[in-house]
Amino acid sequence: MDLLEDGFIAGPGHHPKPEVRRILFVMLKRYGKFRIVHPRPSIKLSEDEQSAIVKMNFLIANKQKLFPELELLYTEPVAWLESVDKSADLYTLSMELGAESGEWLLKRARITGFARPHGRL
C-alpha cells in the first residue's frame, strides 16, 4: 500500500486507495493459502523514463489444488485454459506507474478476470 500514490485509482469501479486494502483482503481471504503464477510482465517505459505501463497476466490457485505442468500445454491453448480453469482463476493486471523522488509509485491499476468456460469469473 505504501507504493500507491495518493490519487491512486483501481478499476473496474474507480476505487480509491482506502477501498483497495479492503477489496484485496476479501479477495485473497477467499483463496486461503494460495500461489500466484505468472509469465514475465510486459513493460513499456516512457521516453523520459518517468512513467511506465505494465501489463501482467497471472493465475491465482489455492495451494492445495494441483494442475499439470503448464509448459507441457504451451502449444495447446484450449487444453491449457481447460486445465487451469479447474484449478485457478486467470487475471490480467494493467498498471500505470510514475517515478517520484527516485521511487516508482502506482497511479492506476485495472484487474480483469478471464471468463471461465462454465461462465464463472
Image (tube, helix red, strand yellow):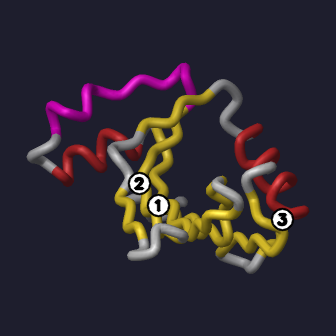
Picture residue at 76% right of the left edge, 38% below the top: 29
Q: In the picture shown, does residue 58 fall above or below 68?
A: below
Picture residue at 84% right of the left edge, 52% below the top: 21
Q: Is residue 47 magenta?
A: no
Q: Residue furthest right?
A: 18
Badge 3: residue crowd in 10 Å (few <14, some 14–19, many ≥20): some
Q: CA distance from mark 2 to mark 1?
A: 4 Å
The amino acid on which the numbered mark 2 sits, given as a three-letter code, is: Asn
Q: Which residue is mark 2?
A: 57
Q: Which residues are magenta?
A: 62-73
Q: Give the number of marks.
A: 3
Nearer to me, 20 or 71: 20
Quadrant for the C terminus in the image: bottom right
Q: CA distance from mark 3 to mark 1?
A: 20 Å
Q: Which residue is mark 3?
A: 17
x and y, in percent, of residue 34 in the image: 60, 29
Q: In the picture shown, does residue 73 fall above or below 47?
A: above
Q: Residue furthest top?
A: 64
Picture residue at 72% right of the left edge, 48% below the top: 27
Q: Is residue 65 magenta?
A: yes
Q: Which residue is mark 1?
A: 92
Q: In the picture shown, does residue 52 fall above or below 32?
A: below
The amino acid on which the numbered mark 1 sits, given as a three-letter code, is: Thr
Q: Which quadrant of the view contains residue 7?
A: bottom right
Q: Is residue 32 left or right of residue 114?
A: right
Pointers 2 and 1 in contact (CB under 8 A)? yes
